[in-house]
Structure formats: C-alpha cells, structure tokens
Image: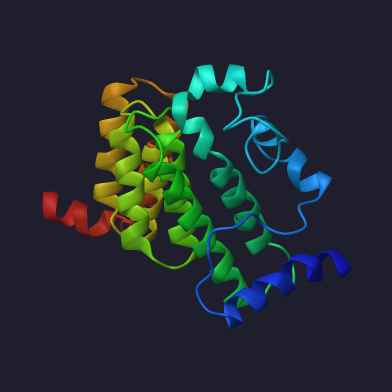
Amino acid sequence: MLRLLNFILPIWLAMAAGPAQAQMPPNVGPGELARLPEYCPVTQSFAEGGFPSGPLPSQQPWIARMGPGFWAVHHYCWALINASRAEAPGVGRAAREHLLHRAIDDVNYVLRNSPADFVLAPELLLRNGDYYEKLGLPVQAMESFELSRRAKPDYWPAYTRLAALQARLGKRDAAIQVLDEGLAILPDHPELSAAKAALSRRGSAARPAVNRQATNATVK
C-alpha cells in the first residue's frame, strides 16, 4: 500500500495543479525498471552521463540501432511505467486516465523528436492505440493501429490489434479484411491466420441453424 501511495500521491498533486509538464515518473523502483525494455536503463533520465557530453559506451549500440531517436526514447520508457501503473490494483478511474494520457503524451514526444523512419515508430503507434482503447476512445485507437501498420506494413501486431478492435465494435467483415491485407503481405503468418480463423468460427457460430425440415420441404 505504501508503495502504491508513493506514486499515486504525486499524480493527484499534479492533477490538482493543472496540466503538468512532461516529467519522469516518480519513485521508479528496481522491479519497474527490470520490466522495461533492455535499452531503458541506459537512456537519459535513467543513466548518468551521455548526451550532451557524448554517448556512454553502454549507449553506443542502441544509438547504432535507433539513430538520433535514441535521445528521445526515454519518454517511451516513462510511458511504459505510467501505463503499467494505470493498471495497478487500487488506482482510481481519474488517476488511471491521467496516467494513460501521460503515457500517450510521452509516446507522442518520441514520435515528434525522432526521424519519420524511426525503428520504434510502429511499436510506439501500436502502444498509443492500446492506451486510447483503454481510455474508451476506439476511433483514436483505430487511427493509431492504422498508422502503425502503415509505418511498417509487415508489422503483424498492428493488423491483429486493429482487427480485434473492429470485431469488438461489431465490424467483423472489416476485421477479416484487415487480416486478409496482413496475410497478403505475410502469407500463412501464424498469428494472422489464427486471428482470421477465430473470427470465421465466431461468424459461423453466430449464423442461425439451418431448418432441415423446411429445407427438405422446399426441395420437394
């Protein structure tokens, strides 16, 4: 309970004070840090040193993979922490929504401060879709999932997320079309194939049973 209060209290204080500037989540514990992607501990706000004085040895491999976007990616790490905290037991609705909005803001910060071809862009857009969906904003969620697959047409999670959301909204045909578009790029992909099969089975189960007697009577 004390640990929960340690990060919920600053949230409520920030909410009471009005819109907050982007800042690192308070009281990040070793357990939270361990659950983050392996590059997070060496990014700004977590590692001591580096930019602007020069990359640390531990940062150089990630800069080689991410390019200049690495210098903004600590905000994604912040987003992951806030989104995880939003799902913690005992977090009220207002605090949960505040944390998810903070996560979206931090993801958008990375997108604004990294190249258009940033290697993490599809994942970042996918996360935004997840956060919007949790906030009950399906239109924004679908837009984010759509941008994710456009950013990397062979990024299969964007197709399954978008299709699943469309199916939940009752748009089964549109969901199947999305999966077909993914399968056209990634033929026989197991996740896409399984998602389409599940939707097809659900559609078959939803159709009314055939009245055999009436059918036979029609044939006669």
Q: Residue furthest front?
A: 53
- 8 w.r.t. 218: above or below: below
- Residue in front for this viewpoint, 135 or 95: 95
Left or right: residue 97 versus residue 156 is right
Quarter of the image where the N terminus is located:
bottom right
Above or below — where is 151 with respect to 33? above
Left or right, 98 with reference to 150: right
Q: Residue at x 61, y 74 (%)?
A: 14
Q: Residue at x 68, y 30 (%)?
A: 38
Counting labels gives 0
Q: Quadrant of residue 116?
A: top left
In percent of width and height, residue 72 lies at 50, 39
Q: Residue at x 61, y 50 (%)?
A: 78
Res. 108 visible in picture = yes
Residue, far right: 2
Q: Is residue 220 visible?
A: no
Q: How is the image coloured?
A: rainbow
Dividing the picture into quarters, in which one does residue 212 lie?
A: bottom left
Rendered location of residue 184, percent (x, y): 26, 24
What percent of the width, then of the height, locates residue 196?
37, 38
Foreground residue among 101 and 112:
112
Query: Can you say whether 61 is above or below 49 in the image?
Result: above
